[in-house]
Every structure is written in C-alpha cells, then in structure tokens.
Amino acid sequence: MAVSSTPRPPYGVLFSDAIKVAAPTFGVEPVGAVVRHSSEIETVLAGLANEPGAGLIIMPDTFTTVHRLQISELARRYRIPSIGPFRFFPAVGALASYGVEVPDLYYRTAAYVDRILRGEKPGELAVQGPIKFELSINLKTARALGLTVPATLLARADEVVE
C-alpha cells in the first residue's frame, strides 16, 4: 500500500507508475490510500494489517513528513514493514528509507542561485534532478518485525539504525 495525502499529487505519477511496473515482478498488487487527517492513519494501517504479506510505501509529501512518527509507530505496532522517502523515517521507527539526499539538494540549489545572481538567465539553465540517493535501514524495527536483513543489503546502506 502507498500512503499519500492527496489522490493525485503532481509528483505522484513518477512514483505510482514505477510502483505499478515493479509490483508484478514481486507478485504484489499495489493499492493506494489517501489520508488527509492524522485521525485516519490508524484506521488505514489497521486495515492494512489484516492483509497477508502487506507492506507500506510512505509517499514523500508534507503530510507524511509531519506525521512520520505516528505513521512509523503504527506500522511497527501493526507489524507492517514500511519504507519512507527520507532517512528521518527509519530514525523514528520505519523499517527503511530510500530517497534523495536532502542536504545535497540544498547545496546544489545554492550553486544554481549563485549562477543566476552572477547574470545567467534562469530559462537558459538546464533543469537538474537529484543525483545523490541514500538507503537507511532500521535494524531494531527489522528485529521487531521478525525480519533478517541480508548482510549484502546492510553493506550497501548509507545508514543503519541500531
């Protein structure tokens, strides 16, 4: 299940299309849930807990970021493996995260602004996407869920939360 605060966020197609393409490879059926208020989070996750083999993909938006602690704690309580978009999700209890390295985005933005302030025209600058991504794994959550994280995956992680 993928959780987002809006039914069709502008960036959502990037994620939902990738999820739809990858899902059959893993023998899973993707399901989306729109949660607009913190009081709905537990209802959605409690329902997900009744699905065999369920997992949770936490979409990157303001709502999920603000409520990351609640989402991560409930996913853990209901024994649902969860992955978030930023490393601060595993820091508060999600199983893992994989996403852009946020500080790098700010550093690169500053360089872009500097170029504009030095006279380059914004319309002539190339659009830049993220280039640094990071993987974070919470071993405490993995143990609580009864999961063993392969050593090869731990070796590739940028951060391992004990």
Image (spheres, helix red, strand yellow):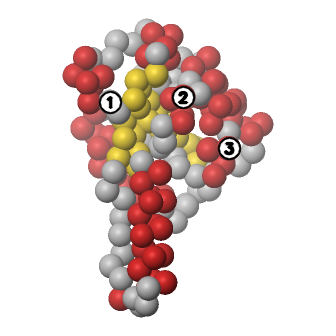
Residue at the image point whose x is 59% and y is 27% from the top? 92
At numbered mark 2, what does the secondary structure look like: helix, strand or loop?
A: helix
Residue labelled with disc 2 = 91
Residue 13 visible in the snapshot: no
- What's the residue at 39%, 29% (across, down)? 159
Residue 99 in view (yes/no): yes
Position of residue 90 in the picture relative to residue 124 (left or right):
right
Counting from the top left corner in percent of width and height, residue 102 is at: 47, 51
Quadrant in the rendering for residue 111: bottom left
- Quadrant housing residue 135: top left
Q: Which residue is drawn at 41% across and 49% down?
A: 100
Tag of residue 66: 3
Residue 124 position within the rendered picture, expressed as x and y whole percent measured from the top left: 35, 88
Secondary structure beneath dot 3 equals: helix
Of the numbered discs 1 and 2, the one sitting upstream in the chain is: 2
Q: Mark 1 points at which residue?
A: 157
CA neighbours of label 1 inside 10 A, class few (<14), some (14 to 19), many (20+)? some
Give the residue at the far right of this rendering.
39
Amino acid type assigned to the residue bearing label 1 in the image: Ala
The answer for how far apart the CA atoms under marks 3 and 2 are is 14 Å
Counting other residues with Cα less than 10 Å from the Cα at mark 2, is it few (<14), some (14-19), or many (20 or more)?
many
**Sequence order check: which comes first, mark 3 or mark 2?**
3
